[in-house]
Image: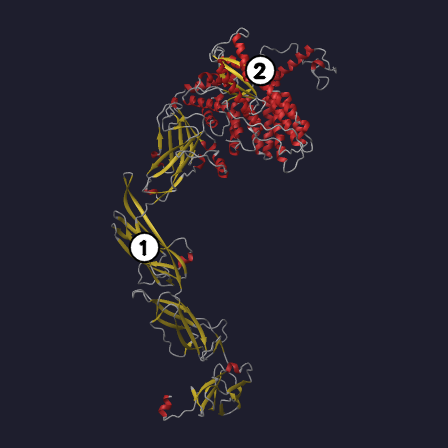
Amino acid sequence: MSPTQWDFPVELCCRPMAFVTLTGLDVVYNAVHRAVWDAFCANRRADRVPISFKVLPGDHEYPKCRPKRTSYEWYIPKGILKTGWMNKHLNLVPALVVVFYELDWDEPQWKEKQSECATRVEIVRQSLQGRNTKVAVVLIQKKTPLPPGEDVIASERAAALCNACELSGKSLFVLPHTDHLVGYIIRLENAFYEHAQTYYYTEIRRVKSHKEFLNKTTHQLLFVRHQFKIAFFSELKQDTQNALKNYRTAYNLVHELRAHETNILEIKTMAGFINYKQAAYYAQERKQLAKTLCSHEASVTYPNPDPLETQTGLLDFYGQRSWRQGILSFDLSDPEKEKVGILAIQLKERSVVHSEIIITLLSNAVAQFKKYKCPRMKSHLMVQMGEEYYYAKDYTKALKLLDYVLCDYRSEGWWSLLTSILTTALKCSYLMAQLKDYVTYSLELLGRASTLKDDQKSRIEKNLINVLMNESPDPEPDCDILAVKTAQKLWADRVSLAGSNVFTIGVQDFVPFVQCKAKFHAPSFHVDVPVHFDIYLKADCPHPIRFSKLCVSFNNQEYNQFCVIEEASKASEVLENLTQGKMCLVPGKTRKFLFKFVAKTEDVGKKIEITSVDLVLGSETGRCVVLNWQGGGGDAASPQEALQASRSFKRRPKLPASELHWDSIVIQASTMIISRVPNISVHLRHDPPALTNEMYCLVVTVQSHEKTEIRDVKLTAGLKPGQDANLTQKTQVTLRGTELCDESYPALLTDIPVGDLRPGEQLEKMLYVRCGTVGSRMFLVYVSYLINTTIEEKEIVCKCHKDETVTIETVFPFDVAVKFVSTKFEHLERVYADIPFLLMTDLLSASPWALTIVSSELQLAPSMTAVDQLESQLDKVVLQTGESASECFCLRCPSVGNVEGGVATGHYIISWKRTSATENIPVISTVITLPHVIVENIPLHVNADLPSFGRVRESLPVRYHLQNKTNLVQDVEVSVEPSDAFMFSGLKQIRLRILPGTEQEMLYNFYPLMAGYQQLPSLNINLLRFPNFTNQLLRRFIPTSIFVKPQGRLMDDTSIAAA
């Protein structure tokens, strides 16, 4: 787990040690050099000087030294401390470069060797590029040197070598490769340490020299920077007091910085760094002081007499020592008595059980933070309680508390805290000899969430293997000696127990050292194709490791037997012969295991899921650990890692073609089993669009392209499910096109048997669909069949199916327009009782196909009567697209009183079919409901009898009939207005009285004067009882114009009649 930008830098948290580089050592191919290097770095005890060694080539390029600044007058700093500065002086810029060179004093070719050594030293100086780094030379010699002063040749040649290399005598050392190599190395280390301290002292002086050039106006940041550098160099020099002093000064200078929202984060960060340094040093000093004060040998006994006793048993004054009550002098009158009193207090202190007091206080604090919902603080205190129980040797309670909070730190990714808690938990489980807990914590401490170093992980891995081999593990470091002895007896008892010990550990709640991901090759597989999937494993432990078994479990357990990989091995071989074996995992390398099996036909349409993956470490006959992943893998850290990977823009390094990036593998733990791919063709033939209510023909053609006969072919056809419920109610499907469908017919016909098909054979099935409403409908044609096939040398019966969908648009076959007109073909908004009027119907074809109007019928409502006989005028009429046909009916409406909403007219029924349809297709009857009409009663009806035309200068008789439609006597004033085109004879103005229900006749002779379409003399009628009866209404019933022919010479009556 890599640290984030919010963690403290590693170089800040580590102990600063002088950095010394060693050149000229070939630690790979030269055994002597390897032994020298091991003596420097292996098994370093605490009493050796704090130096960090590193082997580098002689021509290594060190970081370049910036030119010395002579003035800070115009220099504006960009920040306080560069991120790479601490790491540079800890790991990149050495305090001392040591050149190792194999050269004896009696070397025959001394001059050449001396020159070569000087050249190497000069190369080192050039690569340092003006830094103050010290350079030293160590001569590796085969012989033990004589005491100083006895070997004259050695003294002379040493001086000559120092002169050639431009070194002082204190920088030339001799290292004999003898049996006492470690002793010589320790002496060399001490000399190197002195040189390093000189270098850091020089660096401190150099930084301090810059202060005189700074001013507090523009160089506030530099004051903090330089003070921090002086403190850090003091740490490298191991000068703790000066380091603390300078850190304290730097902290005060940080408080003096001008803070703004643009630099507040930088100021807080530096303040935190410096505060951390001070706190760490104070903690170390306090720890050392506590060890010094409270560590007494067992032979030390409590003083007698007791210096803490008083005569009264009580103190005279609060806070005074019992052996010097009432003494206010600062000088100790009796130092020996003071020493004995302090010893008594220390021995009393050792007898106090502090853990009980601390645990009680922590428990109260946990309850407080739990009450006020502070989960992180509560978890932190619970960790402290667990550690205190550990110190109190109550390992059961300690383990219970630590295990409780582990999940919180895992879920939030506090890996360093998690590692610390796991380390304590591992110690508890070891001291109690809890096998399963010990194995579980070991697995997690070896994993990627652990921040332990590789040597610590190697020790834990070795102990884990010992446990699996039924042996006792080595004690955990820093455990109580007596508790370790007790634990070793418990482990010995565990070893002596016979029988199989299998530990199944679910990894979804922790982070083991093995990661697992399962991935099916595809989200679905056909039933006649083997199911393939991969299991990816990746180990994060320090050394390669061998597992004994890998097995996968499914929701259908019948497949489990096909997905097992097993490799017989003994527990002792877990870490041996790791270059061979299919179950060996190499750290950091992704291993892929391929599995396949044949799905069962009854699982078609079902989902196959991986329920768990088990990986066995150890032997099932002895002790073994079964790592169990639920589903397709993943552990407690996987969701957080997947989220980080998805948000990361970091480019992944290129790997060989055979390797995979672990983050690029996506878990796919389930797949669908789908039916075999059908090898038939389904074609649909029809003539869209469909017309409302017609028996629409859909021809389904099925042809087999299989190599063998297909059986039990079934057809499902009709409206595709899932559409609007109104469409389902208004759609019917049938196989019999000779009958009209009603609402009892279904919208979908299922499992229609159509027999068997041989290879290449085809069949046709005609479906008839009736759509009662317009709009789009999706129709489904589903063909299923059975066929025998062979997969993996096993014959199975596959059920195949193929479906086709088609969207059919339904439209009206025609548009019908209905209007009411007068006998003069004038539009009527209302009709008058007992007055004939005309009903006009216009039929406009909207079908893209030709329509045959078989017949039409007018069904009148009881309130309507026909003036003439009602006969269809559209029998056998064929209408093309856009053509129309009209009918006219003369009707009369008897007086029905005042009816609100009008009077019903009746229905207009049109019988039709497609012209292209066969004779057996039934005729469709479309019923059009005619609109209601408003009926009014009029007091007087006027009717005119006159010829159809007149002739110039010939008499034109006109007879007007005035009929009283009321139950009252009507007083009628009649007048005739002359016209320029006519002369007339008759009553020009008259007043009449017409009895109820009777009729009055008036006769006029009009004499046309002009030819053409002429306006008749206007008849005006005024009803005294009904003033609303206007002449405009009157003109609806009588003609106002007539066509007059010119006067001609006719030979006889026959020609006149013909005319």
Q: Secondary structure at mark 1?
A: strand
Instruction: Kindly identify the residue that appears in the image at 51 percent across and 9 percent down.
Output: 145
Q: What's the amino acid at mark 2?
A: Ser
Q: Residue 283: where, in percent of width, then height?
A: 61, 23
Residue 908 lies in quadrant? bottom left
Numbered badge on residue 275? none
Circles 1 and 2, Cβ within 8 Å, touching? The answer is: no
**Closer to viewer: mark 1 or mark 2:** 2
Q: Secondary structure at mark 2?
A: loop
Observer-nearest of 481 and 360: 481
Observer-nearest of 399 and 777: 777
Give the left or right position of residue 878, taking residue 300 as reference.
left
Observer-nearest of 744 and 438: 438
Picture colour scheme: secondary structure
Which residue is label 1 attached to?
683
Q: What's the amino acid at mark 1?
A: His
In primary-sequence order, the first of circles 1 and 2 is 2
Which residue is label 2 attached to?
168
Q: Residues within 10 Å of mark 1 (few under 14, many from 20)?
A: few
Q: Residue 3: where, in percent of width, then height?
A: 53, 31
